[in-house]
Image: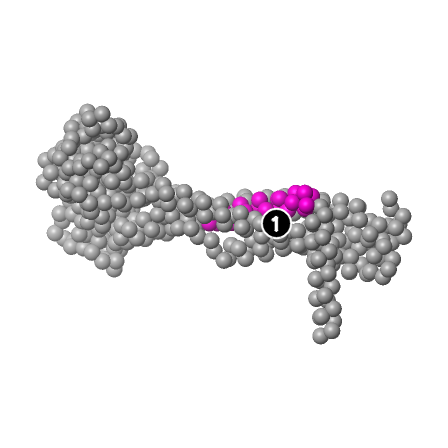
Amino acid sequence: MVILKNNFVNLLKNIQSVWHLIERNKVRSFLTMLGIIVGIMSVIVVMSVGAGAQSLILNQVKSMGSNLVGVLPSKSNSNGPPASALGIVVKTLTLSDINYILNSKDFSHIVAGTGYVRGVDTVTWEDQKTDTTFIGVSADLIVVEDTGVSRGRFFTAEEDRTQARVAVLGSAVAKDLFGENNPIGQQIKIKKTNFNIIGVMRPRGSSGFQNQDNQIYVPINTAQKILLGIDYVSFARFKIDAAENINDSMDYITQVLRERHNIDSPEKDDFFVRSMAQGVESIMKITNALKVFLTAMAAISLLVGGIGIMNIMLAAVEERTREIGLRKAVGAKNKNIIIQFLIETVVITFLGGLIGIILGILISFVVARVAVNMGYNWDFVISLWAILLASSVSIGIGLLFGIIPARRAAHLDPIEALRYE
């Protein structure tokens, strides 16, 4: 018990001595810590931003519902996502494919579905203009994406079939063009074609990195024939009645598309069917891998910081050679000198790590607030595991890179050290 008490007292004395050294050499101590501060800060920010990006995806899935099956044209393989997901135009999926699946009497678990096409244009109303994206969808969008309008109404299946020139504005577009005025009944111009405004969507926030409130919805037949001049869709979504029927629904959609596209083997598929849950799982794998990679890159600065600490501590050994010699002359053992320098290094790196953690949390909070103010459903996430990891790494670096200076100091000859000028 006495030995433990003495060791604890000696530890406190060493820490107090280190603190006095830091106070005497504030600039050098800060420069010593800088690499650790930047490294720990980077690790915290990368992990927090990565978790925030994942929360953005999960929050969007929750807002749309999980009972969704998506269909993309072109086939995916183990080497990556389908070509259409990378922005390559693939024309194999058509509106007639979607309508056939929806109207079939052989399968009853698909309750709604819509295809999607999109374009970009400068939309005008009188002397007001705004650059926005117009989305061609079917009347089922309200059911598929579990959304609705705040004013007016959404277009009907009949208006879609007859290529009606009607539009439903996203809340941000309505505000940009009309301010406080009521847009219902007004006319806007998209690609030199007049559209009657029949509704305004309720605020939806962002999906991925696309602000859904800055979009205009028009009937998909109108978008295809009048605005874009195409006969294919970019992708499709289907709403399933219950989660337990998703796999059967995916099999049914796959079977129908193979029959309609005259495909006799899975290797020849020109489409890609996935549930929302599978899509989220794939995205999570990608974001986790990216997060690990970026964290590893950020951790390189910790290695650089550790080498910097070692170099400065070696210089400190040279400066304090006479002090070390005096301590050894009055009875200090090698282990006492080693412990002294190790504690010195660990305290410096721990302080650097603490500052890095605080700065990392502050920067992560600012990033989260900026993302929220931009309309993204972004969570501020700081895990206890990340903080414990950062603290452990900073202490570990202090021990690892403090060994060489400590051993060098401990093996100085006391007589030669006392003669050192």
Tell me, yes or no, whether the highlighted magenta stretch contains residue 114.
Answer: no
* Outermost bottom residue: 1
Q: Position of residue 129 (x, y in %)?
A: 25, 28
**Residue 7 in sight:** yes
Q: How did the renderer colour the structure? A: one colour
Q: The C terminus is located in which quarter?
A: top right
**Residue 258 in sight:** no
Going 32% across and 40% down the picture, which residue do you hit? 210
Per the rendered image, the range of residues in magenta is: 26-48
Mark 1 Cα-neighbour bin, 10 Å: few <14, some 14–19, many ≥20? many
Q: Position of residue 333 (x, y in %)?
A: 82, 61
Magenta region, main secondary structure: helix
Q: Position of residue 388 (x, y in %)?
A: 54, 57
Q: Circle 1 sits on which residue?
A: 352
Going 47% across and 56% down the picture, which residue do you hit? 383
Q: Quick check: 86 left or right of 36?
A: left
Going 27% across and 50% down the picture, which residue do you hit? 64
Residue 3 or 57: which is nearer the viewer? 3
Q: Quadrant of residue 121?
A: top left
Residue 208 or 202: which is nearer the viewer? 202
Tell me, yes or no, whether the highlighted magenta stretch contains residue 35.
Answer: yes
Going 19% across and 33% down the picture, which residue do you hit? 223
In the image, what residue type sits under mark 1? Gly
